[in-house]
Amino acid sequence: MKIYTGTGDGGKTSLFSGERILKDNARIEAYGAVDELNAIAGALMAALPDSPQTSAVRTQLSQIQSDLFHVGAWLATTPDSPSASHLIPLTADPGKRLEGQVDAMQADLEELRSFILPGGHPSAGWAHLARTVCRRAERRAVTLAAAQSEKSDQTDNVLVYLNRLSDYFFVLARFCNHLAGIKDVIWRG
Amino acid sequence: MSSGGDKTAIPSKLPNLYAAAVCGHTWLAAHSFEIRFRRPAEFAFLPGQKIQVTYEGIKRDYSLLTIPEGDELAICVRHIPEGRMSPVLAHATIGQIFHLTPAFGFFLFQPSQRPAVFVATGTGIAPFVAFVRSGVRHFHLLHGVRCAEELYYHELLAPAASSYIPCLSGTRSPDPHWPQACAGRVTAYLENKLSAGDYDFYLCGRGEMVRDALRIIDRRFPSARVFTETFF
């Protein structure tokens, strides 16, 4: 299959719901940030050392990558359009799953009383980058939600998921350093 | 090579693949034919979706012509004598086994208040046949082919359409048997003849057609919604 089609050469693309819009549209910005986050999650997985504990993290990240495809699909679809009926509904479950994973990792970590500087093991560095891009994706999704005339459960669940996912990546960054035997670098101000 | 007589050697369902036996074959025009498979149990799909047919390592995507409630899966194939898959399908025998992926894709009809304009070239008519067989009506259809002989499925499509417009790219003059036909490509019709409006466009065919049609749509119909299925 050819990867290039030439259909976007004029600076426009199609939403999943069919509208032709410019590629700098707020909706493209939102799912573009989610796509960027997904790529970073892949880099994070590649940077994880092999161990039984990282194997579990790898499984979590693989599920997150799948979640992000669903999130991207919803962001690429105008709410209440006919196309939305073809998408798998986003529920609150993935966000709750993340909460459980955050709690499990935190149980192995020292309580944090200060800000920390991003860095440490390469996998932790990628997790911090994922956290920041996740926050950007969340901000873009907030922009879309604010522009919507009506409340949407799907949009609400996207916002909850991205908010929780950012927390997950923050804790995962610390967990990656913990697994590598690297201490958090405390910000001294 | 037929594997139809060796069914016991072929699992009925490989991981992510269904084994399907050929149950019918019909030439539609000199270079195009329809091939039908017995629908495997549990094979589900939506009108407009496609499958990938695999045979001895060769893989090709085809849109389904049939509806989910039927006993058969049918596809429309352009015969390319020097190709690798279409000659195999063209000479397939009844009972011969091919492996099919589950149906995939999102080229699905989206009910809307806007007029729908279906644009197909060649065998790209397939998903629109599935749409009509599933009950879709009141659409405008442009079918681009080289000559009128290739206007397969017109008996099904024309009565269901608000307007059925063959676009004959291999002729310069009107065909007396097809007074509603236009000489030229579907893109010429979009450029010069389709009246202004807010449409939902559905484009299915070769990449060049989809690309050129989108350029015209972006310029002439900026508020359009567009759904595309590209044949490579």
Image (cartoon, coloured by chain):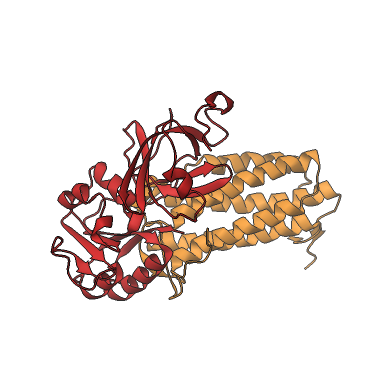
Work out whether residue A126 can be spotted.
yes
Q: Colour of chain A?
A: orange
The location of residue B207, given as percent across then percent down, is 43, 64
Work out whether residue A113 can be spotted.
no
The location of residue B192, given as percent across then percent down, is 23, 75
Q: Nearer the viewer, residue A68 or B158?
A: B158
Q: Nearer the viewer, residue B60 or A7?
A: B60
Residue occupying the far right of the picture: A181
* Residue drawn at (77%, 40%) of the image: A53
Q: Colour of chain B?
A: red
Q: Nearer the viewer, residue B178 or A25?
A: B178
**The C terminus of chain A - image quarter:** bottom right
The location of residue B63, given as percent across then percent down, is 39, 48
The location of residue B29, given as percent across then percent down, is 30, 52
In the image, residue A165 above or below residue B38: below
Q: Is B150 on the left or on the right of A164, as rendered?
A: left
Q: Quadrant of residue A57?
A: top right
